[in-house]
Amino acid sequence: MYLLGYDIGSSSVKASLVNVETGKTVASDFYPRTEAEIIAVKPGWAEQRPQQWWDSLKHATESILASSKADPKDIKAIGISYQMHGLVMVDKNKVPLRPAIIWCDSRGVPYGEKAFNELGEEKCLSHILNSPGNFTATKLAWVKENEPQVFEKIDKIMLPGDYIAMRLTDRICTTVSGLSEMMLWDFKENKVAGFLMDYLGFDGSIIPEIVPTFSIQGRVTAEAAAELGLTEGTPVSYRAGDQPNNALSLNVFNPGEIASTAGTSGVVYGVLGEVNYDVKSRVNTFAHVNHSDEATRLGVLLCINGTGILNSWSKRTVAPEGISYAEMNDVAAKAPIGAEGVSVIPFGNGAERVLQNKEVNCSIHGVNFLTHNKSHLLRAAQEGIVFSFMYGMEIMEQMGMPINKIHAGHANMFLSPLFRNTLAGVSGATIELYDTDGSVGAAKGAGIGAGIYRDNNEAFASLEKIEIIEPSVSDSRAYRDAYDLWKERLMREI
């Protein structure tokens, strides 16, 4: 028996086929091979055609079925992970009315700020746990004002994962977790955020049917089965945004558990067991995959934009020409902890929510031309990224979330011993590295939703732990001193 997982990203769509009994991936592929097109009609805009996701999903599915030689009848459930905060609008015939406005599009910002100010900070934060900000709801507010002819034709609004589920099953539905990503879930009232819907002028009929995250949410239609090479009637039994799903992929379900990634952006995602929020809205809070009325499970999300881009900039600009990332990490490690007083403030990739949407840019501090060299700059860059994580993690701790253990995939910047040792050293947390990814997590989520696995512990019993990094007691003071100096310099910038 197999489980099929899809990860609908903005760069590509990945598909993985997982063996139910062993928990191992038998085939995996992604499409397109180069980054998918993002339409930018104006600066700050970002759109994609939903059909593009479907076409990529089709290619990836064909590839894994061919390489695995699996019988589609043996695929017992399908799960979907997807890029968060996008807006797909369909008419009564379930046809998209325009390209999707995706997560990194910023046109909703002024609408979110206006709503936050006029509805009141306390009202928004206590009910939806965030500022309305630049999320799905405020992107729809932009459509209402600027494309009224489109807005009038809307039958339902969806997230990217909801759209893919609709194409598979012909059923339009969403989840509480998804609605919280849209900023349309009221955690005080445990229902759609009517006060924000009314303020923005949205009719309640545009909200899809709400289904549990883990449940039979629909079954593959004959049409979709014929197009994809799947079997009619296969259940779609799980969906979640990419960051909640990444946490699921690392078996992070309970209060105090933390998942982290450090790729294009840097993310720390922790589970909180009580309804709470940051009064300055510097971190985002959503319903986690296992949130319910009976058991509060909120995902608190810290995102640092200037992560992968600083690392790649360092390689292009500072590192000796032609070396690999692994070799660059070796050069960086030649400098001592704290880089002998050099600090890099890594916020050079647009406004950062953790800084209350300030755009402070990247800056380098403390360079002495007589004593410092490439290794100091390279180390300070990686430390700067880690310290930005720590800055956000302190906010999460203030919300009542202890950070003792961090789960991460063995990928991207977590491949760097310097990066992970610094994170363990400055936070005092143990880091556990695992071999997994989003599409594999989605497949196992489908197994939970279809009742094939009893619970998450059975689903992730085969999760392979690659390495454990314990914080260095002897170096803890050096890491904290370097962080305190970095934080002092950051305060001058903001």
Image: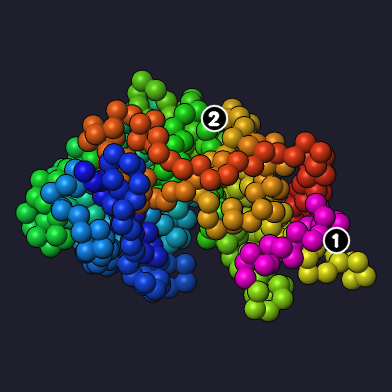
Residue 256 lies, in percent from the top left, at: 54, 30
The tag on residue 24 is none
Cα–Cα span, label 1 and label 2: 36 Å
Residue at mark 2: 256
Residue at mark 1: 366
On the picture, is 275 further left or further right than 180?
A: right
Residue 132 lies, in percent from the top left, at: 44, 45
Q: Which region is colored magenta?
A: 324-343
Q: Nearer the viewer, residue 281 or 465?
A: 465
Tell me the quarter of the picture where residue 461 sits: top left
Tell me how the rendering is colored: rainbow
Tell me the quarter of the picture where residue 341 sits: bottom right
Circle 2 residues within 10 Å: few <14, some 14–19, many ≥20: some
Query: Please, what is the three-letter code of the amino acid marked with disc 1?
Result: Gly
Vertical position of residue 440 compared to residue 8: above or below: above
Query: Please, what is the three-letter code of the amino acid marked with disc 2?
Result: Gly
On the picture, is 310 further left or further right than 342?
A: left
Q: Could you tell which of marks 1 and 2 lies nearer the N-terminus? A: 2
